[in-house]
Amino acid sequence: MRVTLQPGVRATWTTTTKFQTNAIECHFLQAVTAADFGEMNLLSRILTSGCQLYPHSEQLSAALATLYGADLQISNRPIGQWHDLTVRLSFVEPQEDDHNFTACLALLGEVIFHSLLTTPQAAQIFAVEKRALLSELRDLQTDNGFQAFSLTKSAFFQQTALSENLAAPAVGTIAEVQAVDLARLQDLYREILSQWPVEIGGLFRQTPAALTARLQTALPFCPRTTAIQQPMVVNTPQRPLQRVEQQIVGAQSRLCLAYSTDTPLQQAQWDQLLVLGQVLGGSEQSLLFQQVREQHGLVYDISAYFDFTMGWLLIDAGVTDSRLGQVQALVAAALTQIQQEQTPLSLLRLVQADLLKHREMVVDSPQRLLNRQLNQVIQPQRQRSDAQFTAAIQAITPATLAKSVTLLHLQVVTTLLGREEGQGHDDIKAD
């Protein structure tokens, strides 16, 4: 069921008795140009910490416990060139009169509309959460996998016509968080409440009576007058190959390879690249895992995946010693093998079966079902029936998979070279 509560505010829900829990989500969607990831991460932390009715986290936790153990989660994630600030409340409904749903909906409204950001406590909670977030981000500076990804993403998107916010990791950067002040976060909060398009999703064992009217009362959003101006999917222009090099402490090195794709892509090409990522590095049976790790013993771990919303295929590996060049050569050899239509048929069939099984399992998970519900709303042009998806995936052969390799263009090579002692430096070069 789908209804419009206000212009720019819509609700969609599914009724199923498959799960014991119910869930309701509010997705605030906007282009990444509206805010950076540091601001959004800090805002989500403050919203999670309490509200005017329950100003301390302990009080909010106690209130959730009285609602038969309801669970509140608030987070921000990127979907291509969009922010998705999500407020999610899951709960059980032990009574036939929807009493717990009414109480949960009221609490959801309190958390969304009555933040501590508009109270005299704002400065204190802002300072506490900002310090905590900066501490977490500083800890990530010693996570070599995270650093390899962050450096790769920064190089991949720098000096393009796309928003500079897109180049940062989803958790934000130290510089972003240090730059934000309380006034900016208060303005952002008010802007989100009054302007950002809202998609409300629900999953209920039994649809509550008069649901539309109750949503309008508990969540009194004002009409939105403008739509999101940026497309969700990133179209990344091809640029000269960039090499990012850095020395790190430790015996293990890291290699990260980022490939852009031809754009715009057709649905069949998306499917082929999805399968290609899985064939390359989606499991322990993948080409790269078997050839680079099992046969040659050059990596601790290696993976690959294609993200159509970001417009890239990413390969990441933890490399033994300093044999980065050998690993990169084996990756190139694996791509050549696929391009020459020599993908092992047994591996291709395994990947296809895994993708179809994953789609079947969507209905077995409340969160996956909610994710599908949101995708159907924000990407209606990509929606297919299970039969259509199955036919499309099963139609992929070594010959069609070979064509997908020609869509890839290596854009960034990031190498973090492990050293037992000493500190390194960053260097970005264009070939």
Image (cartoon, helix red, strand yellow):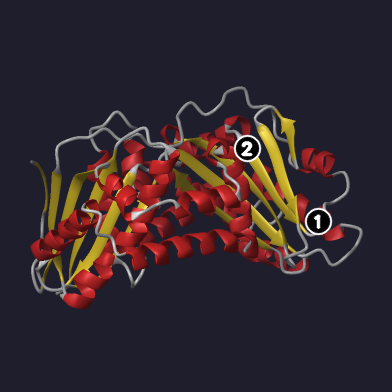
User: Which of the 4 image quadrants contains residue 365?
Assistant: bottom right
- Which structural element holds mark 1? helix
Q: Position of residue 216 (x, y in %)?
A: 78, 38
337 vs 92, nearest the viewer:
337
At label 1, counting other C-alpha atoms closer than 10 Å, the crowd grade (few under 14, some 14-19, many 20 or more) is many
- The single residue placed furthest to the top in the displayed view is 225
Q: Vertically, is 228 above or below 379?
A: above
Amino acid under disc 2: Val
222 vs 411, nearest the viewer:
411
Q: Which mark is residue 303?
A: none
- The single residue placed furthest to the right in the displayed view is 97
Residue in view at x 48 percent, y 26 percent: 229
Disc 1 marks which residue?
101
Sequence order check, earlier mark of 2 and 1: 1
Q: Vertically, is 248 above or below 402?
A: below
Q: Which image quarter holds the C terminus?
A: top left
- Which structural element holds mark 2? strand
Q: Is residue 117 visible?
A: no
Q: Residue 198 carries which label?
A: 2
Amino acid under disc 1: Phe
Q: Where is residue 215 in the image (x, y as percent from the top left)?
A: 78, 42
Q: Distance between the residues labelled 2 and 1?
A: 20 Å
Q: Where is residue 80 in the image (x, y as percent from the top left)?
A: 42, 41
User: Which of the 4 image quadrants contains residue 240?
Assistant: top left
